[in-house]
Structure formats: structure tokens, C-alpha cells
Image: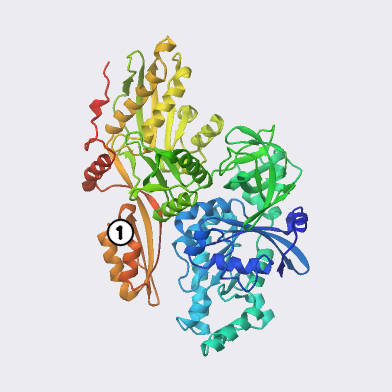
Amino acid sequence: MARYRQTDEIVKLMDNPTIIRNTSIIAHVDHGKTTLSDSLLAAAGIISTQTAGQKLFLDSWDLEQKRQMTVFASNVSLVHTLDEKDYLINLIDTPGHIDFSGAVTRSLRAVDGALVVVDAVEGPMTQTETVLMQALRERVKPILFINKVDRLIKEIKLTPQEIQRKFAKILLRVNTLIEKYAPAEHKKDWQVTVEDGRVAFGSALHKWGLNIDHMKMKKVTFQDIIDAYTGEPAEVGRKVDELSKKAPLPEPILDMFCKHLPNPFEAQPYRQPQIWPGDVDSPTGVGMAKVDPNAPLLMCISTIEVDPHSGTVAIGRIFSGSITKGKTVQLVSSHQKGQVQQVFMSMATDRVIIDRVPAGNIGAISGLPSIHVGETIAEDGIEVHSFEGLRYVSDPVVTVAVEPEDVKDLPLFDKVMHKLTTEDPNLHFHMNKESGEFLLSGMGELHLEITAYRMQEAGLKVKLSKPIVIYRETIGHDYTGPAVMGKSPNKHNKLWITIEKLSDEVIEAIKSEKITDMQSKDERTKILRGLGWAPDDAKGAVAVEENNILVNRIRGRQYVDEIIDHIKTGFREAVHTSPLAKEPAYGLKINLEDVTVHEDPVHRGPAQAIPMTWRPIYCTILLSNPKLLEPLMSFECKVPSEFVSSVITLLNKRRGKILDMPSEEDMITVKAEMPVSESFGIADILRSSTQGRAFWATQFSRWAPVPEQMQEETIKKIRERRGLPPTPPKPEEYFESE
């Protein structure tokens, strides 16, 4: 059984990677992750058994408790004894709602295994697939817990045979996803089956759980479980309590962690090529493969917390070496150095100061104020690659205008927004230059609602606009005319531009941060060559902004190097606010073809070079059949057959497109896509039109062109909201002639 240990005893276990299990709990929202976590913490002695299931201990924030919904990932270390051997389990409970899926992405970088929790009635849902896909892409091995089995008995009244058939369908779906997303070498051996003990089932609320090994050990059958829920309420309560004592939930779950999830020695060699592009034969690469605490330090930061007492606290996995108090380290991505002030281990809501965290463990550090999520912490004085960028499943697609109610609160406003965006990189905050508005973008309505609550909690009273959908701008085709010239305001400098569409492969590489503005030129060149770019263009890629790349094709011209930073600034301005509606550009390759520069530095400063750059970019965009892109979300709704027409009607009214409608018994799953702009308020409509019997989920799907018949009106509304003339500019407004 798991049991509480003093900190010094846990610290001793950190030095033996063979007994360490770094794992997370992942699931669709409301499938019971945090309720399950309570039982695991109770087994470790961190909370009482009596309050487990109701306390929701890892939902430490008051709003999480009120909403009964996880918003932040929470870390805890506990000890489990199996076959007289102690195991250290570093556990991360993750959010289930799609709006907070970024926290799942970040947490999975730190772990080697994941417990997938599935509601026995609802089965795998959209977010189940999403989080499992995320885990498998990080080469994180899954095991399965089928929760809320009591609902199959009490609500649906299934027989033992029917329960087993229900389990078989869930297993088939989960294993299909594993086959689809797992790395090639693990598509078969990571399949979860009841027979090998990698599948457990039970009720987190009622605190009982079993897998095949424990059913045999405890001599419990499916009929015994059904019998426990049969009879008068008082009798059922007594029998279920007896079941929880005979088959306590933590035992099979924790045993599965130890038996079926890999330790760092096993996991790091096959995870290394996926998450770190460095030289495997370097001292750091060898140290990572061997989980060597004495090798050069390599740590990946997965979570940032801004604490009023400790300052910026960075949490992450140590893959090589050890992190110690007072150690001077380098922040590889941001090209900085810093000194670690304190080292911590996380114990749910507490951080415990310790001296050191060795390779194979998850630890926390303070003293590096400028650090960001995804940063690579490495040994000072060595050359080392950053970890691969985190691949988020969604983009921020909903925006609100936000401002403090009292102008005197502007300093606090700045401080709070810095804290929020540092802790949550899926929040984007910027000022609209045209309107002067402060704009906050997030993954969805709920994400922004929660953020607003956090502002109030920090003592900041703000005014929020209604949600605004974020669009993107792109081109319908590559520009095919002669290079477009831009002149500096003083007419002494000239720049020629062409424009092309980036391939989907390059866009994906930017999204996943395989291509970044901060990486070395050689590294970026190599990746672009691998994606089919011509050598000169790959070598000439000088700036990456959002999902756009600036390529310098200019050769043999004087003073280019002296103004290239100004040109980059002009490029960034252009792609941040494109000409159609001042929305960000998407998927553009902007080529610098030629330039003439005045010999006198006075005549080629930023005031001259920046407009000389963005004006011809605007012109080429407008000459290339510009398109407005809107965000689409995938929509999945499980609903009894008698209510399916209501769901279809809702989708038809909101420009939804039905993709599939598989049926299972008396339930139909409606799979569709719909514009984010049409999604606001659907929760209330679905509840009322289906009498509360629909289970649904949404997530960002893709960017797609606004329908041709709607583009003009949509652009007009965006421009008017921003205080701009209703009609976009013409290319002639930016065209320069010799």
C-alpha cells in the first residue's frame, strides 16, 4: 500500500531511477480524475480516507472546488510498497476541459506514463482522444482505468455480460487510438488488455477498484459488484462500503503504476529522440540516456508559478545531471544565465525545500525570473540543444478587450497580466495600436472567464468586452508578378518583395516549435532543407513570426546587414496586423528579393526601413487574392436517438457540417465541425433541447477560409469594431513606381 513518508525518506528514493514512476492522470472533463487522485493521496496519508472523493485535494484553488473542475496541473510525490519494495511515484493530475489542454501538453513532457480515465457510460470522448494523442506523441505509455462502473449498474442496469461487452467496446476504442498515435515500435506492446493487468475498473466516488489480478486475489466477481448495488439504499450503502474495504481503489491503480509503467532508465532512451534533438553521443546525450545524476545538467521546464514569496518558480523534469541550490545554469532558448536560489519538491499544495533533485525526477526551482514554459535549463559553459517545442492542440481563438475600471490600477494591471501570461503561455495579451485596446486571447470562453476571475482574485477590477473571435489572413495563391518595390519615406532606399504560401508541413513545424526565431541559423536551415526548401532559401530564413517566415534572397548589396533588424521589425508589424482586417497573417513566406540602401546611415534608420518593408508586404498580399480564415472547432455529441434531430437542427443553424454519426445501442454520436463564431451559448441550448441527456465536447480543429459570400461582410464588421474604414485598402495604396 501507499503510505506517507517524511521528506528525507522520499529524497533518498530519488537516487534510484529503477523505482521511480513519473506519471500523470489524463481524461475527458468530468470523468473522475481528481476524485481518483483523492483516493491515491489518502493511501499515501496526505488526506484522510473519509474525505477522499469529496475533498478534491489537488483542486487546491477555490474556484476549482466550486466548479468541481481542474484548471491547473497539480504535482505530488508519494510512496507505494509492492512486493516489499518501495516505489516513488511522482504524480501529476491534469485538467480535462479542452480550454486547459495546454496544461496537459506541458505536464506530459515531464512524465513517462499516463493513466487514462474513461467514464464507463460515456466512453472515450473527444478530449479522451486528444489527451491520449498528446501522450503518445510525447512517447508516454498509457494504462487504463474505467471509472463510474456504478452508473452501468444503477442507471443502465446492465448484466455482468453486458458490462463486459461495454468494457470491450471501450478497450477497442482506446487501443485503436494507441494503434493510430503510438510510435511505430510501441503500437503493439502498448495495447491495453484486461488479461495483462493494464486495465482497471471501479468507482472513484465509492472508492473501490479492481483489475484482473486483484479480482483473483480478492475473489471478487462482476456479479458480486452488481449485488453490492442491489437492495434498499441503506443496504446498498453498507455493501458498497464493504466493497471499498475489500477492494480499495488505490491498490490496483498504484500496482499498475509500478508493474506496467516504465522507470526513467527504460523510458528516457526511447523518449530522447522525440523530445530532444541533441547529439546522443555528447556527454549530455549519454547522461540523458543513462539517467546519470553526475552528467551535465539537462532540465525541461513544464510549469511556471509566480509566487508572492518565492518569486518565479519553475517546475520540470531533470533528464540528466542534478539541480542544486546555488548552481549557476544557462537558459538555452533565451541565451541567459542565472543562479538557482532554492530547490523544491512538490507535495500537492505545498513546496518542500530540499538540497538537490537528481536525474529521473520532477523538481522545482526559484531564482530565474525571466524563465518561460518550455525553457531548457542546462549546465553552464556547454553547448547544448534545447528540447523540442511543445505541440499544443489548439490556438487561442477567442479574444476579449480588457481594461482596469480605474486608470490608477494600470501598474497593478500590468503586474497581474505579466503573472497570468507567464504561468499560462496559452494566454496571449497585446495592445491594438489602432484602437488602443488591451486584448486578451484564450482557448475559449471558459478559459477567459477563469482568467477574469483570477484578475479579480488579485484585487484587480476590470471591464471585459463580449467575446471576439480571432481570425487570420492569408493569400489565395502565390504572388506571380514582378517583385513589388517599397520605398522609404525619404525615397533614398528601395526594397523588392515577393510572397508565397508556406506548405502545411512547414506551418506544422513552426507550430510545434521545431522551427523558431531563437534557434541557430544552421539548425533552422537543416530543418527547412528537410522540408523541401531550396538551399539558398533555407539558409536565408532570417525571421520567424507566428506562422510566417522572412527569407533574405539579397546577395552582394552593401549595408544590408546594417538594416536587416529594421526589415525584420517591418516584417513583424506586417504579419501581426495584415491589410484585410488587421488580423494576424497565417502561413506566409515573404521573400526579400533586392534592395538599394543609401550610403549615409542617417538616411537608412528604422523610420525609413520599417515602412519600406511593411508597405510592399501589404501590397503583395492584396495582389494575391487575400483570404480571411476563421477558426473551426470539432464538435462531438453523444445523445439518445430521440434527441439527435435537436442536435442536427442546432448544427444546421450554426453553419455546422456533420462528418459522421456512428450509433451504439440507443446512443448516437454526432461528429461535426462548426465555426467558433457560431459556438457561443451552445451549452444552454443543448441542455434544454436534449433534457440534459447530451454529452458533448469541443476543441479547436483548423483554420478555414470564411465562405466567399460572407467574407466581405465579416471583414467590414471587424474593421468597424476597430474603428477602421469599412472597406480594405487597395493594392495601389501601397504600390511604388520607379
Q: Is residue 459 left or right of residue 434?
A: right
Place residue 6 in its image quadrant: bottom right
Which residue is rendered at x = 48% and y = 58% of the image?
A: 130
257 or 439: nearer the viewer: 439
Residue 323, x across and y down, in percent: 71, 44
Tell me the quarter of the image containing the N terminus: bottom right
Residue 24, x across and y down, in percent: 59, 59
Q: Is residue 5 left or right of residue 425?
A: right
Q: Is residue 151 left or right of residue 721?
A: right
Which residue is rendered at x = 52% and y = 53% of the image?
A: 103
* SS under mark 1: strand
Question: Can residue 561 be seen in the rendering of this structure?
Answer: yes
Mark 1 crowdedness (10 Å alpha carbons): few <14, some 14-19, many ≥20: some
Residue at the extreme top = 600
Q: Which residue is mark 1?
A: 657
Question: Can residue 552 be seen in the rendering of this structure?
Answer: no
Which residue is rendered at x = 50% and y = 57% of the image?
A: 71
